[in-house]
Amino acid sequence: MTAPPSAIDAKSLRIFHLLLSAGTGMMALVLVGIRIGGLGVEVGPMVSMLLGAAGVALAAGSLVLRTRFGPGRKAEAVEAWWAADRRAQRALVMWALAAAGVDFGAVAYFLSGQTAAAAPGIMVGLLALVNSAPSRLEGG
């Protein structure tokens, strides 16, 4: 009988969170910069509002998952804490939802130039990414 697959190690999770956050932020900056530079695409306000609302919903879903994550580690080792209760997998889903919220907000701004449609998704998504950093989840 083979051993079950090992959990994702803590260092890899930290690197993944950092790169996902940086990539999401860069994409948002590029899309906003292109729009400000006058190269955006014009769509109706309803499309941008729907994209913005989807961004907020995704990022808010990430924040809801954060509340169900449980307390940080006490005396147990970092690797053991991440392996218990499938925390690593839940963290990856949580980070993906937060990043998607930022992406949807950035695309909404790129397509319409409406800050009201884009800013909530971007801000809530960035808040969720910061609030769910590995060091915060571990209780550090």
Image (cartoon, helix red, strand yellow):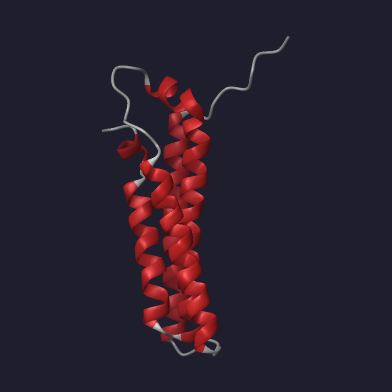
Measured as percent of width and height from the top left, residue 72 is found at: 31, 30
Considering only vertical position in the picture, is 1 above or below 14?
A: above
Considering only vertical position in the picture, is 45 above or below 74?
A: below
Spot the residue most to the left. 140
Considering only vertical position in the picture, is 24 above or below 28?
A: above
Measured as percent of width and height from the top left, residue 43 is found at: 56, 88
Considering only vertical position in the picture, is 49 above or below 138?
A: below
Which image quadrant: the N terminus? top right
Measured as percent of width and height from the top left, residue 59 is found at: 43, 58
Spot the residue most to the right. 1
Q: Nearer the viewer, residue 28 or 61?
A: 61
Corner quadrant of residue 140: top left
At horizontal 44% and vertical 51% (from top left) the residue drawn is 62
Q: Is residue 22 visible?
A: no
At horizontal 48% and vertical 43% (from top left) the residue drawn is 16
Q: Is residue 103 visible?
A: yes
At horizontal 54% and vertical 89% (from top left) the residue drawn is 44
Count up the numbered dots.
0
Q: Left or right of 136: which side holds 125?
A: right
Corner quadrant of residue 74: top left
Q: Left or right of 109: which side holds 72?
A: left
